[in-house]
Amino acid sequence: MTQPTFANIAEDDAHVGVQIGILHLDVDYQPPPEASPEQIFRIGVRYLDARILDEARKLIEEAVALGCVTTNEVHFCRLLALLSGRSLRHLDLDELDQLSSICHRIGHVDGDDSWAVGLRCILMLLDNVGSADPALTVKKIEELPERQRALILDHLGVLREGPLEDRMWQLSAERARSGQLAADRTGRAWIFFQPNPARARVREAGRFSVRLADLGRAALGGLVFLIAVVEVGSLVLQSGGLVPIIAYLAAVLGAVMFAWQGAEWHFRYRRVRGKDAEFVALPRDETAPPGGFARRVDRLFDDYFGRYVPGDTDRSTWLQQTAGIRQCLRDEIVEIYREQRIHGDQIAWLVRYLVSDVRQRWENGTLAAYRQQLRTPLPVIARCLLGLAAIVLSGLWIMPAAIRAAPLAGALWTILAAASAFAVTIGGFRIDTERRRVRADKDECADKLRAREEAYKRWMRKLARKPTDAEMAGWLECDRRILIDETMRHYKLKASQVIAQGFIEAPGRSAKRARIHRGPWRYSRYQLLLFLLTDDGVRQVDIELDFEKVLFRPSA
């Protein structure tokens, strides 16, 4: 029985359910510039662990040729790379000569370290069939340290044919079953297909901006109001009455009270109106390219809002009442990430966080909590109205006194004071509200950024458990061996009865894919076609593998 050979097929009628993939640049198989022989050897071992045998053989032999110290580990890995997945009768003459040269160079193996005992087991497997007791050989392999035992079972299980091959296959299948879910595969495998996330961002607070008309009202109206108030005060003093003077002072204090408390009231009112506008859904922009970033963000928000429905809430009600805030969040994400060469999947974590935050506030009843927070306190309203009342009532004494002192000038300055007060109030309130809005937006942006950065850190802690490429390869190899073993059990075949076996492998439907730099593509779903060649013919099995959930399904 020979070790399976694998090929990625994606042509003719093969279905490829992915168009793009994730490339992890944090680790790769590329030796660094001017790498030492030892560094090249380590990269070769990495290829060996990932079952990329041609590159493993090439780099390990290159390291030896460049002067890598030939320790027991080096000899062990050289033999594994040369013999992996093959029996001795499948080696050509050049490979047999290379095998002979390696064994001659090894000579006598000294030491009792793990690599030394592992190397002695390989040499025992290479010994003549008649001189090696299968039971003793298997016992020696079972007693090896875990690392060396796993490597020999994974790579040299078919080196010898006959009873030894059957027993080696049993050990290999047992190891595959114990290793299939090892290292929390179901909790970690999905992470390999996650892109490096984009960092948290927020839309910057809008700059201070007011209309020229409001600036003109505030500046010109304020100047005219000041002059008019001074002139009216002068006429009141000329009138000589005590009551008008007291009324004038009350009007001035009322104006100060009205301006101070009225500005607070106006800001809170406008702030609530602005927040309420976020809940109003506007027609969606349909001009975005179908495959563009904005459309991808649309799909993310639609998907997560459709999935993160609060408990005891009808889906249609949830989607309808959050349409405005959904669009507001979507527009922000599109704006702050569109020009940053960011792919949609890199901000999926942020969309999930934003949607879950909306859901949590919905469930807590705090989605519209800003209305309570920004509600104008009754004392503010009372002081504002009191100041306005003081101005109006005081005018009943101020106006007659000013007109008595100078009929024409008094009437004119009183009218100018009232008109300019109206203008400066409109302009001044709007300018002050904009000033407060900028400060409030900056504070809100800082709070949002802190919350999003915390969510980013939580997501990065999850991604830190990403499996290595060697772990992905090991899990996939376990799946293959289990599939082969179950197929042989189904057809009541022993390992020694299988002449050859092989896989045709392709990505499954809707598969995600990812790889490290210069590594092979790994898929979240595989389409596996297994062939077993025996004396009685060929057995074929077509299986779909859900790699993340570790589920085998017959192909549709």
Image (cartoon, rainbow, N blue to C red):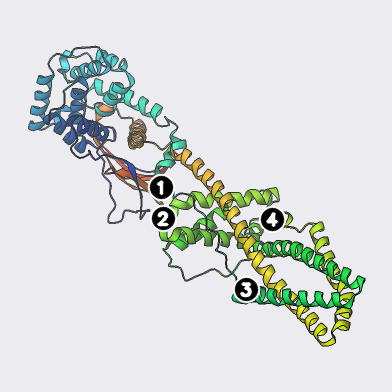
Rounded to the nearest angstrom, the CA distance separating label 4 from label 1 is 35 Å
Q: Amino acid at mark 1?
A: Pro
Q: Return the x and y of residue 522 as percentages of the image width and height.
A: 34, 43
SS class of the residue under badge 2? Answer: loop
Identify which residue, 206 or 395, lies in the foreground: 395
Identify which residue, 344 or 441, lies in the foreground: 441
- Callout in the foreground (4, 2): 4
Rounded to the nearest angstrom, the CA distance separating label 2 from label 3 is 43 Å
Check disc 2: other Cα within 10 Å, few if <14, some if 14-19, many if 20+: some
* Residue on which disc 1 sits: 195
Check disc 1: other Cα within 10 Å, few if <14, some if 14-19, many if 20+: some
Q: Amino acid at mark 2?
A: His
Q: Amino acid at mark 4?
A: Tyr
Badge 2 vs badge 3, beta-carbon distance below 8 Å: no
* Residue on which disc 2 sits: 343
* Residue on which disc 4 sits: 370
Work out whether mark 4 precedes mark 1 in sequence or the reverse, and give the earlier one: 1
As drawn, the label of residue 215 is 3
Pick the quarter of the image with the N terminus. top left
Work out whether mark 3 precedes mark 1 in sequence or the reverse, and give the earlier one: 1
Q: Amino acid at mark 3?
A: Leu
Check disc 4: other Cα within 10 Å, few if <14, some if 14-19, many if 20+: few
Badge 3 vs badge 4, beta-carbon distance below 8 Å: no
Rounded to the nearest angstrom, the CA distance separating label 4 from label 2 is 33 Å
SS class of the residue under badge 4? Answer: helix
Identify which residue, 16 or 461, lies in the foreground: 461
